[in-house]
Amino acid sequence: MMEQVAHRWLFTVLWVSWALYWWLSARDVKPVVQMESRGSRQAHMLPLFIAMWLLWLPRLPVLGLETRLFPWADWQFWLGAGLTVAGLAFTVWARRQLGRNWSGVVTVKQDHELVTAGPYALVRHPIYTGLLLGFLGSALARGEVRGLLALVLALAAFLGKRRTEERFMTERFGSAYTEYAARVPALIPWLY
């Protein structure tokens, strides 16, 4: 009985808890000097919302999307849960490292600082990395085609947002950001 409850509610609790923390921590940030356009924001938010919808709807009556990628195994559920927790924890670490420089939208803040410590010493976009790991874990636990599609959509959204963010950071910090980008990978430690 308890295992059925965990299988049904664990990922909801994980993601809702993360979203609540994210919302609460978004209150104390620096004023915005420059912000991405509405079209730019929608270009990465739409695929991200579709990805979330694909992963978290209990049933999805679209032909083929609920097809299993591999037979159900309890270990894959728990491995997926572990990956999700690790990914979300990584985003929290990154968010805390950014402090008042953080924004959910691509922006430049008043007195914006270039943060290169903590998770930013491993990857330039640790929040995207952590969220992708969370999506991967959630997709693995679901074990259906829609999870794989959600992961691909989330990756596309973050790659698009990354380009905009890197343009803003290069404009703001110039060679300091260019040098940082040359030595620290974008999303995957030691690789990319």
Image (cartoon, rainbow, N blue to C red):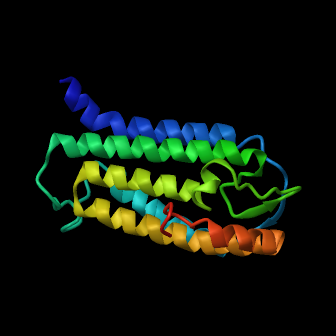
Q: Quadrant of residue 96?
A: top right
Q: Nearer the viewer, residue 52 or 185?
A: 185
Residue at (57, 67) in percent of width and height: 186
179 to the left or right of 126: right
Residue at (47, 72) in percent of width and height: 156
- Residue 87: where, in percent of width, then height? 46, 47
Residue at (21, 29) in percent of width and height: 3
Q: Quadrant of residue 151?
A: bottom left
Q: Residue furthest left?
A: 71
Number of numbered discs on residues: 0
115 to the left or right of 60: right
Q: Which of the image's four quarters has the N terminus?
A: top left
Residue 133, relative to residue 180: is it above or below? Answer: above
Residue 148, relative to residue 15: is it above or below? Answer: below
Residue 190, relative to residue 95: is it above or below? Answer: below
- Residue 155: where, in percent of width, then height? 45, 67
The answer to whether any part of residue 11 appears in the image is yes
The answer to whether any part of residue 36 appears in the image is no
- Residue 4: where, in percent of width, then height? 20, 31
